[in-house]
Image: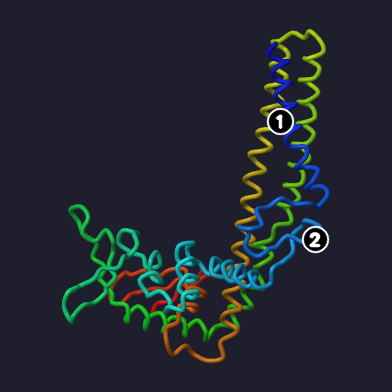
Amino acid sequence: MSSLAQEESRSISENCTWGQRKRFADGKVTVPFKRFLGYDRGEDGNLVINEEQAETVRRIYGLFLQGRSPHAIAKLLTARHSGKNRAGSMGVFSGRIKCADCGGWYGSKVWHSNSKYRKTIWQCNHKFDGGEKCGTPHLDEETIKQLFLKAANAIFAEKDGVREDYDSIKDTLFGTAELETERLRLQEEMNVVEELIEQCVAENARVALDQTEYQKKYDGLAGRFNRAKGRLSEVSQAITERQAKREKIGRFVSALEKRDGPLTEFNEDDWYSLVEYATVYSREDIRFTFKNGMEIKA
């Protein structure tokens, strides 16, 4: 009875998903068009790009690849839609300034909040935690901006070398050909094992098999399937990470090449496009790590 119930459950599951698989195979999609930004429903029921909305979608992806959080992106788009000024630097520096003593992040603090001497500073969020406080200094926003300009201009002076280095290593570090071959092999393996499992269950439903032997065979196939599935997840993740890193550094190199001269004033887009984070060792030793991994002491 248990084998029959198992086969019936699998059959129901297959029937429920067959329709969707057939639609995918035919190139058809099902999406909530009223809440699906960037696309409209075409005359044939398929996706048609909404060019006006697509501009916003491209902007969102670009901001995300710069390193902005979903909250920061939503806040920025809302501000632009309402005609308000862009978000202040409190959001810009969040999660981007690291304490060299404890490895924690700097956070913003407001000094003299109710007086004309009101000032926003940044210091380690764990500076006063526990018995031994971090010795790294606090920084005001203008200091951070000026140090960034200094470090950015230093790397601009080396942009030709940065491009050459990137071109020489990108295929080695970010290539995915071998991983994609393994992914295809794993997908084929899972398809084969899935068919073997179906055959095993179907045979048990038709013939009075020794249930101990049947369960042993079924468990072996299920284990083989799950191992392939687990490895497929790892390989797919590795491919995604390599592609994302390649895209991130490629955008960084392109941002460098677009500059004709040195930076003279702080700009959020430059900050997000170029810097991974800054590490504070002391007031005289603040190092900026750029998106290609280069570290510049400002």
Residue 135 pos. (x, y %): 23, 65
Q: What residue type is labelled 1?
A: Ser
**At 38% across and 70% down in the image, what residue appears?**
93
Q: What residue type is labelled 2?
A: Glu
**At 35% across and 74% down in the image, what residue appears?**
286
Gap between marks 1 and 2, in whole Å?
A: 32 Å
| Residue 254, image quadrant | bottom right
Q: Name the residue under label 1.
A: 13
* Mark sitting earlier along the chain (1/2): 1
Label 1 SS:
helix
- Front position in the image: 144 or 45: 45
Q: Name the residue under label 2.
A: 43
| Residue 105, image quadrant | bottom left
- Front position in the image: 94 or 84: 84
**How many marks are shown on the rendered structure?**
2
Residue 273 pos. (x, y %): 52, 74
